[in-house]
Image (cartoon, helix red, strand yellow):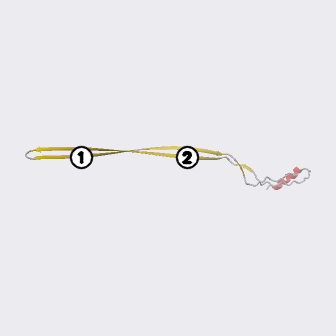
Amino acid sequence: MLDTTPEPWTVSRRAASVHVHVYVYVYVYVYVDVYVDVYVDVYVYVDVYVDVDVDVDVDVYVYVYVDVDVDVDVYVDVDVDVDVDVDDSYVYSRTPNRQLPLRLERGGSGSWLHGAHRASRRASP
């Protein structure tokens, strides 16, 4: 007997999928240099006057200078990494086969082919 049971599931091939991953890494380097210079100048003036009496005059001058220098350096490093993944695989679909079983009838010519032709013509819309 001819087995006309349809396949329960069809096998379909899924189209290739391409995944593109772009990774961008940004590195920022900040360098800060602080320079502090302190200058101290001290001036001492002593005047001595000798007369009938002794007179001492002392003058002290102190000068302080502060110099601050700030140096900032910024470096930016950008690294781009691109990863491409291609997946080409087979997937078994869950769609049942819509094919109808053939009903073979004995035709007027006595061949099974004639019956199969008539049955398939009836099954099509």
Between 66 and 81, the one nearer to me in the picture: 66
Give x and y (percent) for residue 105.
88, 54
**Coordinates of residue 92 in the picture (x, y in percent):** 72, 51
Tell me if 75 is positioned left or right of 47 in this view. Answer: right
Q: Which mark is residue 62?
A: 1
Which mark is in front, 1 or 2? 1
| Three-letter code for the amino acid on which mark 1 is drawn | Val
Residue at figure coordinates x 64%, y 45% from the top left: 86
* Residue type indicated by callout 2: Tyr
Q: Which residue is label 2 attached to?
A: 23
Q: Residues within 10 Å of mark 2 (few under 14, many from 20)?
A: few
Residue 110, which numbered label? none
Callout 2: helix, strand or loop? strand
Percent x, y for residue 91? 71, 50
Instruction: Mark 1 or mark 2: name the one nearer the start of the chain.
Output: 2
Residue sitting at x 52%, y 46%: 25
